[in-house]
Image: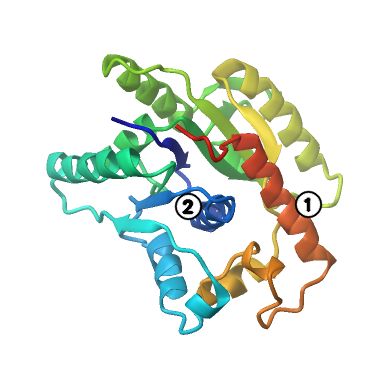
Amino acid sequence: MKKAHVIVVGNEKGGTGKSTISMHLIVSLLDRGLSVGSIDVDARQATLTRYVGNRAARRDRAELDLPLPEHVAIPPTGDGAADCARLEEAFRDFAARHDVVVIDTPGSDHPMSRLGHSFADTLVTPLNDSLVDLDVLALVEPGTMKIRRPSHYAEMVWETKKARAMRGEKAVVDWIVLRNRLSTLDARNKRDMEKLLAELSKRVGFRIIPGLGERVIYRSMFLEGLTLIDLKKKPLGFDFNMSHVAARQELRTLVDAIGVSAAAG
C-alpha cells in the first residue's frame, strides 16, 4: 500500500535545472527527518544518479553526517513496456517503504516519463525565465503576446491526470511551476513572462513560485556531492556569502510550498 508523498520533477525541455532541484529537494527532505527514495528516469543523462554517486563516494561522508536517499536509476532499453514495468516495480517498492519518493524525469516525451508523471502528488516544473522556454507550456501569438493554447507538455500533464483517474486514483495533482534563474532586472521579458504565466496558471491549473537563481555554487557543488543544506553545518571549502543565504531561502520556500511534513503519507 502506498504511503509516500510522490514528487515528480518534470519538464520536456532540457537545461532547466531538474536534477539540481531534485537533489536539493531530496537532501532538504532528509534533513527534515523524512525517509526518501529517489528514482532517476532520466538515466541516460544520469545527472541525478551521478550527483548521488558523488555524495556517496565522499570519504568524509560519515564524518560530515551527509544523508543519502535510497536511489535507483532506470535507463531506457528501447523496450517501452519492459521499461515501464521496471519503473512501476521500483516505484511500488519505494512508495510502500518511504515517506517521500522523488522522481527525476527526462527532458523529452518518453513512456517512462509519462508513467512517472502519473504517480505525482506534487509536480514541480522548473522553467527558465524565458519566452523560449515558455513554449513547452503554451503557444504564444507573437504579435499580440496572447496565449493561443496550452502546448505539448501541458497537454501531457493533462493526459497523465486521466491515467491516474483510470487507475482509480485522485486526478488532482498539485502542480508547481518554478520561475528559475530570475533576472534582477525588471526587463520587458520578465514582465511578459509574469503576465503570461499568471494567465496560463488559471487555464491549466498550476501555481507559481520563484525558483532557484542562476548561481555558480550549484555547479561547483555537483562534483562534491553537496547541496546548500549541507553548508549550513560548515562551509566545507565554500566561501559562504549573502548570495548563498538568499539561495537557501529560495530552496526553503520551495520545500515549504510542497508542504510535506514528517507525517507524510
User: Residue 11: x and y, percent?
Assistant: 48, 42
Count of marks, rendered view? 2
User: How far, Cα to Cα, is label 2 from label 1?
Assistant: 19 Å
Q: Which residue is mark 1?
A: 183
Query: Against 6, is 147 above or below?
Result: above
- Three-letter amino acid code at the position of disc 1: Ser
Q: Where the N terminus falls, by quadrant? A: top left
Q: Quadrant of residue 70?
A: bottom left
Q: Which residue is mark 2?
A: 14
Query: Against 16, is 115 above or below?
Result: above
Observer-nearest of 215 and 108: 215
Query: Against 85, is 64 above or below?
Result: below
User: Residue 173: x and y, percent?
Assistant: 48, 24
Q: Residues within 10 Å of mark 2 (few under 14, many from 20)?
A: few
User: Residue 85: x and y, percent?
Assistant: 17, 40
In the image, 245: left or right of 56? right
Query: Against 199, is 126 above or below?
Result: below
SS of the residue at dot 2?
loop
Residue ID at (33%, 39%): 95
